Amino acid sequence: MKLIERKSDVIDGNKMEDLGGLVKFPVYMGCVSHSADDDLHADMVWHISPTNGFLQLKNLIPLDVLYPENHAGAIGSTWMQHHQAFADFLHGFRPHSVLEIGGAHGILSRNYHALESDCDWTIIEPNPIPAEGVNAHFVKGFFDDQFKLNKPIDAIVHSHVFEHVYEPQVFLGHIANFLSEGKYLIFSLPNMEEMLQRKYTNCINFEHTIFITEPYIEYLLQQHGFRIEKKEYFLDDHSIFYACVRDSNVQPTLLPSGLYDHNKQIYLNYVSYHEQLIDDLNSKIKDLNDNQKLYLFGAHVFAQYLIGFGLNTQRIECLLDNDPNKQGRRLYGTDLQVASPRILEQVEHPVVILKAGVYNDEIKQDILSNINDGAVFWE
C-alpha cells in the first residue's frame, strides 16, 4: 500500500509542524470477514499549520483501501433524528432538483421526498447501499472534475462528507464550477470543535483527515464564492447545517488569529486525556474478578482508538454493536468479534466499556432499559 503524503497545508500551501500520533493504526474502520493477516495498518501522524492553525493528517490512505465497502450505518435514534432535522432544514429552501454527494443509503432523500415528493434527487456515491423506500437515482462513483450531470439542479447537498475530503479547496472549487449563480450548496458536517474538546474518539482519524471547524468552513466558502444564508446546530455536539448561495460578489475575509495555539492545545489535551484514560481502564481491568465479563461497545473507530492508545483487550469477551451488518464479523485491525448487545441478557452484572461520544446516553439507556438493568458501564 502506497500512502499519499500531504507535503503542505491544504488551506494555504505552507509548511506543516508535526504533532505526532499513533503507530500502526488500522486503515479501515469497518467490520470484515477475512483473516486478520490481511489487515493493513499505517502510522496516523497529525500535522498543524503554524500560519493558520489548521490540523490535518500527514499520510493519507488510498481511497480504494480506505473505502473497500460502505460502513455508513443507519442505526440509532440520534442518526434518524439528524436525517429528519437536516431534511427539514433543506426543505426550507424548497429545491426541486438535488445532487447529493456521498449519499450512502439515501435516507436523507427519503425523508425529503416525504416533504417534497416531486423532487428529482440524484446521489453520486462510490459504494451505494440504498435503504428501503429510497426513490433516488444512484450513480456509482466520486464527485470530481470528471463528473457530469446532464440536467439542471437547484442544489448540491452533502451530509457528513466534507470532513472526509482530502483536498477541500479542490472539492469546493468543483462544486462552485458545477453550480450556477443563485443556486444552493446545503450541507451537514460534524461539529468537530465540540467533538475534539469533549475527547470523542470518532472526531479525527484516517477518514476525517481535516479538523474542519467553523472558522475554516466559512473562510473556504467565501473563497469560492458562497454566501452563507443560514446556519443551524443539531444538538450541541453533533452536527452543523449550512445553507449557502453561489454568489460571485462574495468577498473573501481573513481567518481569525489565535487558531494555531487554540487547535494545538485541543489536540494535545485530547492525546493526554486518552493516555490517562487507558491507564485508568487497564487498572480497572486488572482488578476485575475472574467471574466478571467485560465487553467493549462500538465496532468502529471508537474501539480502534482505545486499542491504539493501549487498551488491554485480553479480558474483553467481544465487541458489542447494534448494527446487524456488523454482528458475526470482526472489527478490522483487531481480533475481536462483534455481537448484538442482546447477548448481555443472561450475563450477571456485565461490565461495558463505553466511549461512543454523542451516542453514549442512547446506547446506555437502551441496554439498561431493554436488555440488562444490572449492566455496569465504564465511561
Image (cartoon, rainbow, N blue to C red):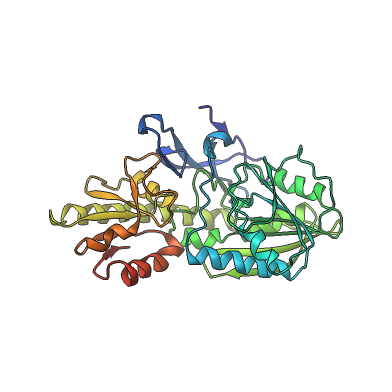
54 w.r.t. 377: above or below: above
**Residue at coordinates 55% horizontally, 68% vertically from top-left?**
81
Q: As rendered, which of 218 and 129 lies closer to the eye? A: 129
Q: Position of residue 324 (x, y in %)?
A: 42, 53
Vertical comparison of 110 with 314: above or below: below
Residue at 50% in and 66% down: 78
Q: Is residue 62 visible?
A: no
Residue 342, can we see it? yes
Residue 189 lies, with reference to residue 115, above or below; the image says above
- Quarter of the figure with residue 16: top right
Q: Quadrant of residue 157?
A: bottom right
Residue positioned 27% across, 67% down in the render: 372
Q: Which residue is situated farthest in the top direction here?
A: 2
Give the percent coordinates (x, y) of residue 239. 57, 63
Q: Quadrant of the C terminus?
A: bottom left
| Nearer-the-camera pick, 269 or 32 | 32
Image point (27%, 60%), residue name:
344
* Number of on-image labels: 0
Q: Is residue 71 left or right of residue 375?
A: right
Identify the residue at the far front of this view: 133
Q: Is residue 347 left or right of residue 329?
A: left
Q: Nearer the viewer, residue 305 or 6?
A: 305
Residue 198 picture location, percent across and down: 44, 62
- Taking depth in this image into account, of 80 and 281 the one nearest to the observer is 80
- The location of residue 164, given as percent across then percent down, is 59, 47
Specify whether 21 is left or right of 110: left
